[in-house]
Image (cartoon, rainbow, N blue to C red):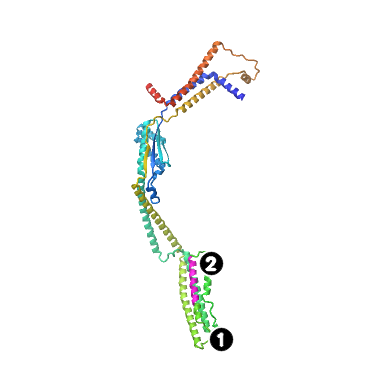
Amino acid sequence: MNEQIQLARRYVRMVWPHRWSALALSLVICLTGWIYVYYLPNVYEVRAKIFVDTQSMLRPLLKGLAIDTNALTNTANLMQRTLLTRPNIEEVARKADLDLEAKTDRDFELLVDSLGKRIKLTGTSRDNIYEIAFEDTRIDRAKRVVDELLNRFLESALGSTRKDTAATQRFLDEQIQEYEKRLVEAEERLKEFKQRNVGRMPGSGNTYFEDLEQARQRLKLAELEMREAQNRGDVLRRQLEGEEPVLGIMGEDLNFNMPTSSQYDSRITKLEEQLDQLKLHYTEKHPDVVGIKEQIELLQQRREEELAEIAANPVYQADIGAPADPLQGSVYQEMNLAMAQADAEVAALGARVEQYRKDVEALERAVDTMPEIEAEMKRLDRDYGLNKTQYEELLKRREAARLSEEADSQADDIKLKVIEPPRIPLAPIGPNRVQFLSMVLIAALGAGAALAVLLSQINPRFYSSEELKEVAQLPLLGSVSLVFSRRQQTERRMELAMFAVVLVGLFSMYGTLVALDSMQVDLNAKLLNLIGKAT
């Protein structure tokens, strides 16, 4: 701590001989800086406050039915869009006669740039109170600018809703006409495509490969039924020829073997197996699952009918041979009739198999064209669906816009109230002269101290024996003190008193200027008046 004190005393001794030079420089800087601070023009701010009333009884009633045209609920964005565009600022500058001060186009561009930077737009959407503020060195010019900004905002805001609604109506009408044209063209393309591909269109809800697989399944089922009918006819034929027994004989009496199986059992079993396999991959509503269930129900019905018919007319005889009695003759007739029915069924199933085979072959031959037709069909359906959806959505929006326009014409739900009109301020808001005065004083004192240090370095001196001993690195034998006479002491005291008076005067001048500024004394106007008289 002692070392720091000694260092501070050393610096004070160094600059003390140059105190008048430092004070003189500080005085010059303070006087010049303070005069310049008061030469700066006063800055005045003009404000205007607007209240946006967006309450309306129709608005909640039409919620969800009409378009929300209440654009002023986000008034800050609307004000920026309306007021801060460059063409609008140029128009404000012309209306406020600011363009008269610009001599060239470049001066006018700089004026517009400065004007846009000084416009302040503030507010909150919670209470819907917004403020327009502008700063300028001239009161009348600041008020003219705020007046023009306020007028332009009111004119733009009151008419923006209806203008936007009308523009929306026109746009929707144009888009509806365009999409109606597209929709008609899509319908015409779809109709022409269907006409060109009659007979080759895919089944409803199925793709080409699904139709092909179903055709193959129908062919397999028909072939199975035809083989079963052929086998049944062969069995009847062999029984008539005596190759197989018709009825077993037990002892002396004739007992009838009641039938427990039918020709449809194997087909039903196979279909049930297929149904089990399909259920592993598809749901109960799949077309293949539903089709096989219907076939199983049909075969089970036929099986029950056949078993009931056989049970009602049992065949009993020892073996096939010539009919020995009328009972055997009736049995032969029934067997011949059954064989004829089996042959007829084989013929019918053969025609069905042939037709199914032709269908499968036709689908297989179309393996290169059908997927393309199917893809083209899907594309046309997709284009038609998109156009139709967009067309219907535009119709809904146009109706909503029409309802909104009628609601706006019935009730004025947007009200603008100027709650604080622009007025001439009584006092300037700037510049902050107290702050500038303090900054000038600190800078002047610092410059004076720097000058004193610089002069001490230019003409260095030793102010103590310790400094001399430290620099010379030699033994110090002694020192001679300076003794002032009475006259010299008096002069020294007067010089110190004068220095103190000047220094105190400097700070007193600073305090006086601060006090005058706090009392709102307009020294700027007096200084400008004085300069004007001098020139």
Q: Amino acid at mark 1?
A: Asp
> Does 362 sit above or below residue 76?
below
Residue at the image point whose x is 38% and y is 61% from the top:
191
Answer with left or right where residue 162 lies relative to residue 307: left
Q: Which residues are magenta?
A: 286-305
> Does 152 sit above or below residue 293?
above
Q: Amino acid at mark 2?
A: Gln
Q: CA distance from mark 2 to mark 1?
A: 49 Å
Badge 1: residue crowd in 10 Å (few <14, some 14–19, many ≥20): few
Answer with left or right where residue 89 lies relative to residue 211: left
Residue at the image point whose x is 40% and y is 44% from the top:
73
Instruction: Tell me which label, 2 or 1, sits earlier in the chain.
Output: 1
Q: In terms of depth relative to the viewer, which is nearer, 354 or 253?
A: 253
Image location (x, y in percent) of residue 451: 52, 22
Indicate the secondary structure of the residue bearing disc 1: loop
Answer with left or right where residue 16 lies relative to residue 87: right
Residue at the image point whose x is 59% and y is 23% from the top:
7
Badge 2: residue crowd in 10 Å (few <14, some 14–19, many ≥20): few
Considering every residue shown, the one lying at the far bottom of the view is 324
Q: Is residue 92 magenta?
A: no
Q: In terms of depth relative to the viewer, which is nearer, 510 or 395?
A: 510
Could you tell me what secondary structure mostly forms the magenta stretch?
A: helix
Image location (x, y in percent) of residue 287: 48, 66
Residue at the image point whose x is 60% and y is 24% from the top:
4
In the picture, the disc for residue 284 is none
Q: In which quadrant is the C terminus drawn?
A: top left
Q: In terms of depth relative to the viewer, which is nearer, 418 or 364?
A: 418
* Residue of label 2: 277
* Residue of label 1: 253
